[in-house]
Amino acid sequence: DTAVSQTPKYLVTQMGNDKSIKCEQNLGHDTMYWYKQDSKKFLKIMFSYNNKELIINETVPNRFSPKSPDKAHLNLHINSLELGDSAVYFCASSRLAATDTQYFGPGTRLTVL
Amino acid sequence: QKEVEQDPGPLSVPEGAIVSLNCTYSNSAFQYFMWYRQYSRKGPELLMYTYSSGNKEDGRFTAQVDKSSKYISLFIRDSQPSDSATYLCAMSVSPNQFYFGTGTSLTVIP
């Protein structure tokens, strides 16, 4: 049974397009995260949501917007995609705080052409 | 300067060797420390978690935190080919915001 799932697994798109990545967790966790992992494997937090409320918003361009319809879902919308957005995006969840074990999704590999 | 520094490797060791992976950091307020393992094209999975200074052991894995030197280590005893992965350290001041190292790529050769 998949704990944290993301769709799509791969996303290839043209510069300037708008795209979304979906994330769902079936663990009953209260906190969800989006991370970006660049080509150098550096994993950086982008957003953190707790019970549908944004609690962390790192220095991320406002072209990126998280949407949480309910506490089991945290989707990532990206407008006007740029070449530098190419990376692997990971969704994760934890019970309450990040000191609880974070469970990561399989990642979405985004390539912007 | 990055918050967390980690040697990317790659590191190759023979099976059975003791592996030492390290991270240094600049923020003396960090108090939560984690090690993640990431297999190729998979999401990171938590290996070890320590709070503040000290050692923690779990099977073949030992995590050490030296806050005075701003240095953390992960030791893997009796390394196995299945340990081949990228190991990421992560640390935090507050419970909801972790900073990750770039990861060290490890290959254990049978």
Image (spheres, grey):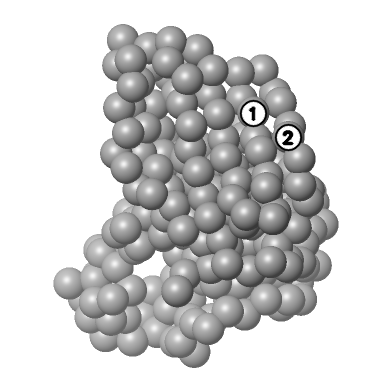
Q: Residues within 10 Å of mark 1 (few under 14, many from 20)?
A: some
| Residue A47 visible | yes
Q: Amino acid at mark 1?
A: Thr
Q: Disc 2 is attached to a residue of which chain?
A: B
**N-terminal label among 2 and 1:** 2
| Count of numbered circles in the view | 2
Residue A82: image quadrant is bottom left
The answer to whether residue B39 is above or below residue A82 is above
Marks 2/1 in contact by CB < 8 Å: the verdict is: yes
State the residue in front, B93 or B67. Answer: B67
Q: Secondary structure at mark 1?
A: strand
Q: Which residue is mark 1?
A: B62
Residue A73 visible here: no
The amino acid at mark 2 is Asn
Q: Is residue A22 left or right of residue A1?
A: left
Question: Residue drawn at (57%, 40%), measured in percent from left and top?
Answer: B73
Chain bearing mark 1? B
Q: Which mark is residue B55?
A: 2
Q: Which mark is residue B47?
A: none
| Viewport quadrant of the N terminus of chain B | bottom left
* Label 2 environment density (alpha carbons within 10 Å; few <14, some 14–19, many ≥20): some
Residue B3 placement, left or right of B83: right
